[in-house]
């Protein structure tokens, strides 16, 4: 019921407000619930809804917005969701989308390119937020989380491997190594 209600009352916004059957855009208005749901639709074997979701995301999601987003949340939820759905859609043995042309990978690359300015720091540990259109705001706080710096490598390395563009993996690896170099004497990050 939750997914169907989201699609009926909230898509293309991020999340459904179930008590009011309205929506909220807490993460940039990128159809977050649908992006988050694609891999579940595939695992549950709902091929038609998976294909519909990929088509809707391809048609409705744009990252060219004047909104500041959390690098961590956008990476794990949006970039990760796009990449996993791309991998599922591309796998001919699954037969989820025989006509799939790679639109989710293109969106993932656009998104990651917009996140890259956050890594332009002396340490390589990214800023916590980045504006999707203009990059890091002047005076942005340098406070970041260990989780952000330490978990970006999976998605960014995957994107580099899929696109052949090593910038993403290099940035995330630099952040991770910089974080590791700052661990405590007890080995804690």
Image (spheres, rainbow, N blue to C red):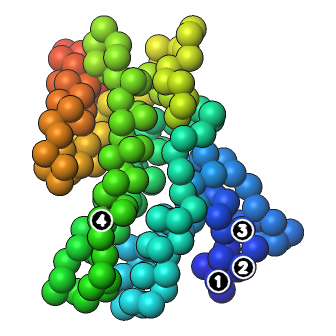
Do labels 1 and 3 touch, CB within 8 Å?
A: no
* The disc label shown at residue 171, or none: none
Residues under labels 2 and 4: Cα distance? 26 Å
Residues under labels 1 and 4: Cα distance? 26 Å
- Dot 2, how many residues are within 10 Å of its Cα: few (below 14), some (14-19), or many (20+)? few
Is tag 1's residue or tag 4's residue first in the polypeptide sequence? 1
Name the residue tied to disc 3.
10
Residues under labels 2 and 1: Cα distance? 6 Å
Residues under labels 4 and 3: Cα distance? 26 Å
Residue drawn at (40%, 53%), measured in percent from left and top? 107
Residue drawn at (53%, 65%), measured in percent from left and top? 59
Q: Where does the N terminus fall, quadrant-wise?
A: bottom right
User: Depth-wise, is mark 2 or mark 1 nearer the camera?
Assistant: 2
Is tag 4's residue or tag 3's residue first in the polypeptide sequence? 3
User: What x and y, as percent, mark residue 73?
Assistant: 48, 44
Name the residue tied to disc 1.
4
Name the residue tied to disc 2.
8
User: What x and y, as percent, mark residue 127?
Assistant: 44, 22
Is tag 2's residue or tag 4's residue first in the polypeptide sequence? 2
Dot 3 falls on a residue whose secondary structure is: loop
Residues under labels 3 and 2: Cα distance? 6 Å
Do labels 3 and 2 touch, CB within 8 Å?
A: yes
- Dot 3, how many residues are within 10 Å of its Cα: few (below 14), some (14-19), or many (20+)? many
- Dot 4, how many residues are within 10 Å of its Cα: few (below 14), some (14-19), or many (20+)? few
Name the residue tied to disc 4.
102
Q: Where does the C terminus fall, quadrant-wise?
A: top left
Dot 2 falls on a residue whose secondary structure is: helix
């Amino acid at each position: 019921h939750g997914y169907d209600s989201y699609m009926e009352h909230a898509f293309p916004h991020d999340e459904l407000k179930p008590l009011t059957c309205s929506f909220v855009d807490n993460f940039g208005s990128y159809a977050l619930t649908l992006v988050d749901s694609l891999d579940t639709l595939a695992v549950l074997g709902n091929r038609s809804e998976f294909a519909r979701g990929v088509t809707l995301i391809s048609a409705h999601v744009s990252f060219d917005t004047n909104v500041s987003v959390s690098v961590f949340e956008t990476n794990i939820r949006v970039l990760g969701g796009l990449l996993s759905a791309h991998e599922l859609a591309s796998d001919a043995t699954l037969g989820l989308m025989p006509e799939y042309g790679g639109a989710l990978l293109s969106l993932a690359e656009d998104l990651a390119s917009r996140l890259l300015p956050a890594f332009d720091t002396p340490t390589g540990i990214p800023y916590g937020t980045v504006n999707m259109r203009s990059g890091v705001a002047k005076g942005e706080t340098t406070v970041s989380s260990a989780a952000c710096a330490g978990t970006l490598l999976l998605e960014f390395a995957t994107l580099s491997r899929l696109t052949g563009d090593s910038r993403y993996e290099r940035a995330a690896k630099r952040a991770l190594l910089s974080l590791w170099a700052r661990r405590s004497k007890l080995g804690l990050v």
